[in-house]
Image: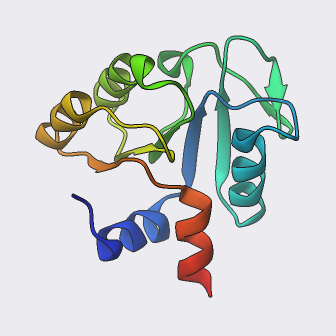
């Protein structure tokens, strides 16, 4: 289990967040959370095969297509899709896999931990960032 100090360190050291499942619709939670993080200085990379861009950034169909170095892979997908996303994050050398509220996959989390990634499950990145900033 990742503790609050580890989460604070991840957020302090991260610059780039690839958001898997980022929508281009402002009323969707993925958009609101990512918009907040972008406004607080993070480079957001949308990963969604159904959109061409979101938040003014080019979207990529798959995590594997992202050319930039990724610090955090923030997942807004159903738990059934998490394993493949985590495996891609491991192969790409991401530092952290963050599964938003309601999203968890303990087997995938175990693989990520074993590969040296920080793993955060079932927590909202916006809520943690906001709490640390206050």
Is residue 11 placed above or below 98 in the rendered structure?
below
Q: Nearer the viewer, residue 65 or 121?
A: 121
* Left or right of 72 in this view: 111: left
Q: Nearer the viewer, residue 5 or 72?
A: 5
**Which residue is found at the position 83% from the left and 30% from the top?**
24
Q: Position of residue 88 (x, y in %)?
A: 36, 21
**Which residue is found at the position 32% from the left and 21% from the top?**
83
**Which residue is found at the position 57% from the left and 70% from the top?**
129
Q: Position of residue 118 (x, y in %)?
A: 28, 51
Q: Nearer the viewer, residue 104 or 42?
A: 104
* Left or right of 57 in this view: 101: left
Q: Position of residue 4 (x, y in %)?
A: 34, 73
Is residue 64 placed above or below 69 in the rendered structure?
above
* Left or right of 22 in this view: 91: left
**Which residue is found at the position 53% from the left and 80% from the top?**
132
Give the farthest residue toward the front. Answer: 102
């Amino acid at each position: 289990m990742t503790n609050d100090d580890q989460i604070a360190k991840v957020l302090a050291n991260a610059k780039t967040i690839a958001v898997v499942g980022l929508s281009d619709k402002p009323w969707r939670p993925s958009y609101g959370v990512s918009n907040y993080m972008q406004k607080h200085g993070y480079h957001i990379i949308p990963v969604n095969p159904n959109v061409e861009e979101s938040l003014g950034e080019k979207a990529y169909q798959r995590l594997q297509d992202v050319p930039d170095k990724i610090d955090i892979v923030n997942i807004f997908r159903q738990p059934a899709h998490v394993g493949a996303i985590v495996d891609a994050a491991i192969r790409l050398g991401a530092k952290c896999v963050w599964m938003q509220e309601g999203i968890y996959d303990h087997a995938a989390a175990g693989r990520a931990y074993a590969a040296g990634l920080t793993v955060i499950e079932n927590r909202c990145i916006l809520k943690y960032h906001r709490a640390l900033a206050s």
